[in-house]
Image (tube, helix red, strand yellow):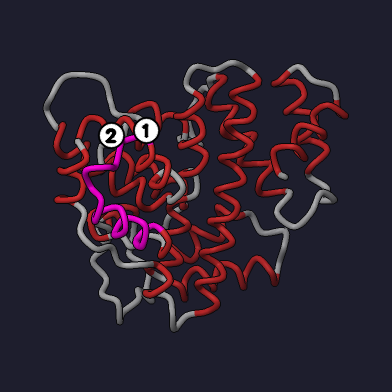
Amino acid sequence: MQATAETFLTRAPRDAAGWCALFDPAALPVLAATAVEIEELRIVEDEVDAHSLGELIARDPLMTLKLLAHVARLRCGREGSDTETATAALVMLGIPPFFRAFGAQRAVEERLAGEPAALAGFERVLRRSHRAAAFAIGFAVHRLDHDAAVIHEAALLHDFAELLLWVAAPALALEIVRRQQADPTLRSAAVQRAVLNVELAELQHALMQQWRLPSLLTELNHDHARSETAQMRNVRLAVRVARHSMDGWDNPALPDDLADIGAFLQLGPQHVLRLLHEIDS
């Protein structure tokens, strides 16, 4: 991200292209825990394997983005399948090259230290993303989907543009929250376009294309796609139920979610609810 640690964007660019120009994946901050653990592993680099390091990175949406975008740049113009997960990207890149490419990482918590409301907003989206990823892989495992790991990653990254907004432009993110709290009937997309001149889903899709992220990952997170595969539905249902159950299981939108999940997984209402509670616990 090109904004310095001392500055935040307070005025929205005019369109998605303007927003895309602000972000450099190599400069994104990561979670403080990720930054610390990478430095601890750097000391014992010879003992690190792609699986354990991949699990660490896969818990952090922003670090996952940094790695996938880095590998995509290296592979630009080469034939072959995409490296669709953090672990696959590490296998392709190699452990020593990873540590050479990624030095000490700046932490989100450090950048937002003086913006407690923004940090709280960021952490709420992060919790929602982790819950969506857990639901997504739970559904995928139930369906015996061979791309369960990619589905998990897609759900984790589904709201990464919102995470970036909190990090880069907390005042604008807070203005969106303020407007929605003042009028709960406002649609999120409409408020985003009014404040940001772009919908976050549109911005996110543009960034994924600009950074050449894996095609399956980009497809699974394309909310405005004309058709929907079973894997896309898996991600969308996981994101929906994670969003609607963030503050408890009495949200009026949840009965529809449960019905749709039941139809998708071919489970009855009680079995769906039991599965969701098991995953959430």
Q: Quadrant of residue 188?
A: bottom right
The answer to the question of whether label 2 and label 1 lie on touching residues, with beta carbons closer than 8 A, is yes
Quarter of the picture containing the N terminus is bottom left
Name the side, left or right, on which 121 lies relative to 86.
Answer: right
Return the residue at label 1. 85
Residue type for callout 1: Thr
Confirm whether the magenta stretch covers residue 49.
yes
Judge by depth and name the residue closer to the eye, 202 or 128. Answer: 128
- The vertical placement of 253 against 171, above or below, is above
| Element on which disc 2 rests | helix
- The tally of labels here is 2
Find the magenta span and give its range. 34-51
117 or 51: nearer the eye? 51
User: Percent x, y for residue 228?
Assistant: 54, 23
* Residue 236 spot, x, y in % from top left: 59, 35
The structure residue drawn at horizontal position 46% and vertical position 66%, both measured from the top left corner, is: 166
Q: Nearer the viewer, residue 15 or 44?
A: 44
Density class for disc 1 (Cα within 10 Å; few <14, some 14-19, many ≥20) is many
Q: Report the disc number at residue 89.
A: 2
Q: Most prominent secondary structure in the magenta stretch?
A: helix
Position of the C terminus by quadrant: top right
- Helix, strand or loop at label 1? It is loop
- Residue at 50 percent across and 63 percent down: it is 194
Q: Where residue 66 appears, x then y in whole percent? A: 29, 49
Q: CA distance from mark 2 to mark 1?
A: 6 Å
Residue 142, percent from left and from top? 65, 21
**Amino acid type, callout 2:** Ala
Specify whether 5 is left or right of 138: left
